[in-house]
Amino acid sequence: MTRRRHGDLVVVSLAGEVDVDNVSEVRKCLDEAVAEHGPRLVVDLTGLSFIDTTGLGVLVRVLATLRDRDGTMALVAPPGQVLRRLRRTNLAPLFPIYDTLPQALA
């Protein structure tokens, strides 16, 4: 997991797998990014090979927190397993989803 500022956005990039074994670290990283950098977040899922329902739940919870603060959260999820999972669980419509990070930052 990495965090970096890009203008008034903070970009959190996740890699590998997000599942019940590491979801607490992902939650902490996202919560810290919001607390330290404000309510505009981009989560780059390009490096993920897998995300389970606990990971998806964290994304939805962070989105709800940001919306309560008049914030936004976009996802970068190119075609592949992670995007299919977002679509199968009917979560994709909740987020602006981009194929690439430059598209999300534009």
Image (tube, rainbow, N blue to C red):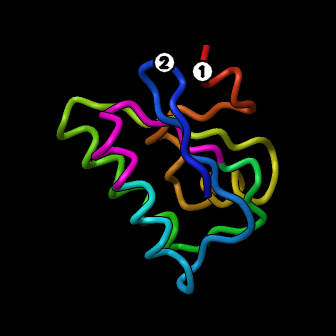
Residue 31: % across, % down: 34, 55
**Above or below 21: residue 55:** above
Q: Residue at x 73, y 59 (%)?
A: 48
Q: Residue furthest bottom?
A: 21
Q: Residue at x 61, y 13 (%)?
A: 106
In the image, 43 versus 2, the foreground residue is 2
Q: Is residue 12 above or below residue 4?
A: below
Which of the two marks, 2 or 1, is nearer to us in this view?
Answer: 2
The residue sitting at 74% across, 47% down in the picture is: 46
| Amino acid under disc 1 | Leu
The picture places residue 83, in percent across and down from the top left corner, at 69, 51
Q: Do the residues labelled 2 and 1 touch (CB within 8 Å)?
A: yes
Q: Is residue 34 magenta?
A: yes
24 w.r.t. 8: above or below: below
Which of these two is toward me, 100 or 97? 100
Residue 14 in which image quadrant:
bottom right
Residue 90 shown left or right of residue 102 in the figure: left
Where residue 105 is drawn, which disc sits there?
1
- Residue position marked by numbered label 2 in the rendering: 7
Which region of the structure is painted magenta? 32-44
The quadrant holding residue 30 is bottom left
Q: Is mark 1 on a helix, strand or loop?
A: helix
Locate the N terminus by quadrant: bottom right
Which badge, 2 or 1, comes first in the chain's sequence?
2
Count numbered badges in the picture. Answer: 2
Mark 2 lies on a secondary structure that is: loop
- Residue 29: percent from left, percent from top: 45, 59
Whole-percent x, y for residue 103 in the image: 68, 21
Vertical position of residue 22 compared to residue 69: above or below: below
Circle 2 residues within 10 Å: few <14, some 14–19, many ≥20 = few
